[in-house]
Amino acid sequence: MFNNLSDRIAASLKGLRGHGRLTEADVDKTIREIRRALLDADVAVPVVRDFTGRVRERALGEEVSKALNPAQQVVKIVNDELVEILGGATGELTWAKNPPTVIMLAGLQGAGKTTLAGKLAKWMKDQGHTPMLVAADLQRPNAVNQLQIVGERAGVPVFAPEPGNGVGNPVLVAMNGVSTAQFQQRDVVIVDTAGRLGIDEEMMQQARDIRDAVNPHETLFVVDAMIGQDAARVAEAFRDGVGFTGVVLSKLDGDARGGAALSITGVTQRPILFASTGEQLGDFERFHPDRMASRILDMGDVMSLIEQAERTFDAAEAEKAAQKLASGEDFTLDDFLNQMQQLKKMGSMKKMLGMLPNMRQHREALEAFDEREIDRVEAIVRSMTPAERKDPKLLNGSRRARIAKGSGTSVQQVNQILENFKKAQQMMRSMGSAMGGGAMPGGPG
Ligand code: GDP
């Protein structure tokens, strides 16, 4: 996401470096390049105009001319203004004073509503809420079933139409769903509604009817970031047709050029609350304008990375590993495998690494990084005997050949992984002694 845009903005800002004082011509050249990059990224024209206007005004103003480092000051201004068009402060969901909080999802078919319903429910459940999903999308043949699957995965109950519960009538289903949630003392209800491939009046009417029947505290407009320029137009249609309180950008993992993210708040004056970044339940983040701006300017998004790590790392496993380290017990191939699996749980390594500052210059290496590497480690370690896993020195040439065969790899790959393991082991040993465990074989005490 944003790769091209980010490269181009970074390149044009780089052009300012080395200048002591900036002339109006320097600033204008940079702004022209940024404007072109934004337009090519499908950002809506009025948003681009406002953005460049504000950057120019500030860049030619006192804050830059008096700055010790004018180029950096311009970078800061671009950053500030990006944060601004992405919505400023991080948006918050509105919770009902008297539960349940009712959240309605709206958007075109295929926008990612049903998927999002599951992600949102899981996210809330993980925070101690008691969500319920309501299947009021009766348009798409498989939608109810899909929501049931998603709900099961998230461990969240799904209210679906059945005889007597309003089959064929989405408004009735939504109402019954909300009252069931109330009855069961659920604190939040998420109502999935139908979309169409294009905007049409009948769909808008249905969404309005559901809205009027359930009176949502939040109506979230889900929009596929990949639709580029159309996003702003569809958002306006939904704002006028149904009205919404917040936006969810979906498919931000794709090669969306960024236009949707950068246009929607400016066009609709509604905050982007969440981002959906994949097909799995965990591919979901709160949307932080400041962090997103840093990502665009390639200053990295370390906070999101840490949060993702905290969410996915198995705390019990981490604790076990730390204890082991402190006790001075040696790091074995089993531990190595375990570490790899923890990494894999964090989801796409590429996505993660891409959040680190200045990673873009290593993009080629990232693209080449093969997540199957972890599967290979697993296959190789599993082909070893328990004794070998504890003491890889037992692995002579013929055993290595056997293991390569057994794991469907090559002897070189087996050697490579043992080499990597040795490095990890050395590192763990030195960390262990630094932590005062230090009871290494042969060591003092
Ligand atoms: P709905 O019609 O709005 O309910 O859309 P769905 O939730 O059924 O999503 C449509 C398709 O997009 C499905 O194949 C989803 O798996 C996929 N999808 C949804 N969200 C994301 C996302 O964030 N990233 C990616 N890559 N695919 C997604």
Image (spheres, grey):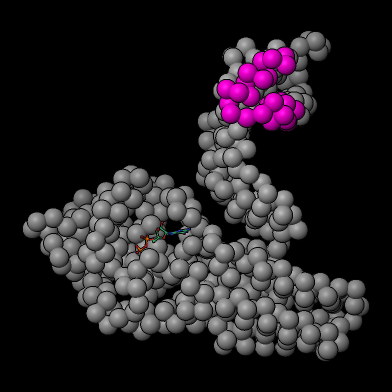
Q: In this view, does 397 lie to the left or right of 182?
A: right
| Residue 419 lies in the magenta-colored region | yes
Q: Which residue is drawn at 81% across and 72% down?
A: 14
Q: Residue at x 59, y 14 (%)?
A: 385
Q: What stretch is highlighted in magenta?
A: 396-421
Q: Nearer the viewer, residue 434 or 272?
A: 272
Q: Nearer the viewer, residue 229 or 415?
A: 415
Residue 334, image x and y in percent? 60, 23
The image quadrant in which ligand 1 is located:
bottom left
Q: In which quarter of the image is the N terminus?
A: bottom right
Quadrant hosting residue 71: bottom right
Q: Quadrant of the C terminus?
A: top right
Q: How many marks?
A: 0
Residue 167 to residue 399: above or below: below
Residue 218, image x and y in percent? 35, 68
Predominant secondary structure in magenta? helix
Residue 217, image x and y in percent? 33, 68
Q: Which residue is drawn at 57% across and 64% down?
A: 255
Return the residue found at the far left.
Answer: 164
Q: Which residue is drawn at 70% across and 12% down?
A: 394
